[in-house]
Amino acid sequence: MTFLELAKERFSERYFDSKPVEDEKLKLILEAGRIAPTGCNYQPQRIYVIKSEEAKEKAISTKASLSGCPLVLLVCYDSDEVWHNPREEGYNCGEQDASSVALSMMFEATELGVHSLWIRGFNSDDVRKAFDLPENHVPAMMVALGYPSADSHPAKLHSDKKPLDDTVIYI
């Protein structure tokens, strides 16, 4: 499968089966995140693997929409280790680094037959409190992982992509 085929195959899964993700597959997914590109290769990502029912309940309490998935990755970045742009005061790559890591893990999951859902509908402070995260670990997103249920299907908008001419500008 080519990368474009893989990217087109992946969709935001909202209907998970309760079957757990195998540890071997989880390690490969986490490895994809480990080798993802980050600003100046500082690798500030901190990934919390949420597997226990107690931890999933904490995540749900933050208003994260977890749809009964068996596994959640809380992707944070360490604000003490993130690259800061010396040409733009106050700018750092934390969100971009976390996004790069999350997307790499999601594509690896797709390659392995594991579905995923990018989740950002939560308040970072609520997540930090629920999991007693260090102040420098900034929650960026959660990635729900699991196998699709019988009800699995892409959302209507999944294949509704704008033409390149609407999103690419040649200078």
Image (cartoon, rainbow, N blue to C red):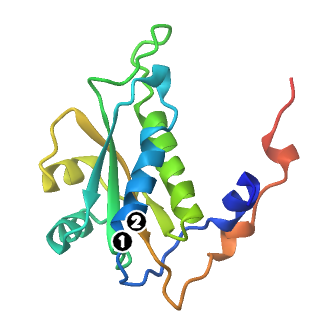
Q: Position of residue 131 (x, y in %)?
A: 15, 53
* Residue found at x 53% / y 49%: 103
Looking at this view, name the residue that lies furthest to the front: 24
Mark 2 in CB contact with mark 1 (< 8 angstroms): yes
Between residues 102 and 5, which one lies in front from this camera angle? 5
**Rendering quarter of residue 16:** bottom left
Q: Residue at x 24, y 37 (%)?
A: 137
Label 1 sits on a secondary structure element that is loop
**Which amino acid type is shown beneath numbered disc 2?**
Ala
Find the distance from the CA under tag 2 to the CA under tag 1: 7 Å
| Three-letter code for the amino acid on which mark 1 is drawn | Leu
User: How many badges with numbers are in the image?
Assistant: 2
Disc 1 crowd, CA 10 A, few/some/many (<14, 14-19, 20+)? many
- Please give left or right for residue 60 compared with residue 30 in the image: left
Q: Position of residue 12 (x, y in %)?
A: 55, 68
Please tell me in which quadrant of the rendered image residue 42 appears: top left
In the picture, the quarter occupied by the N terminus is: bottom right
| Sequence-earlier tag: 2 or 1 | 1
Q: Position of residue 73 (x, y in %)?
A: 34, 57
Q: Which residue is mark 2?
A: 144
Across and down, in percent, residue 6 comes to 68, 60
Residue 9, quarter of picture: bottom right
| Disc 2 versus disc 1: nearer the observer | 2
**Height in image: 155 above or below 41?**
below
At x 19% / y 74%, what residue is drawn?
53
User: Which mark, by number, is residue 66?
Assistant: 1
Q: Is residue 56 above or below residue 140?
A: below
Q: Residue at x 68, y 58 (%)?
A: 7
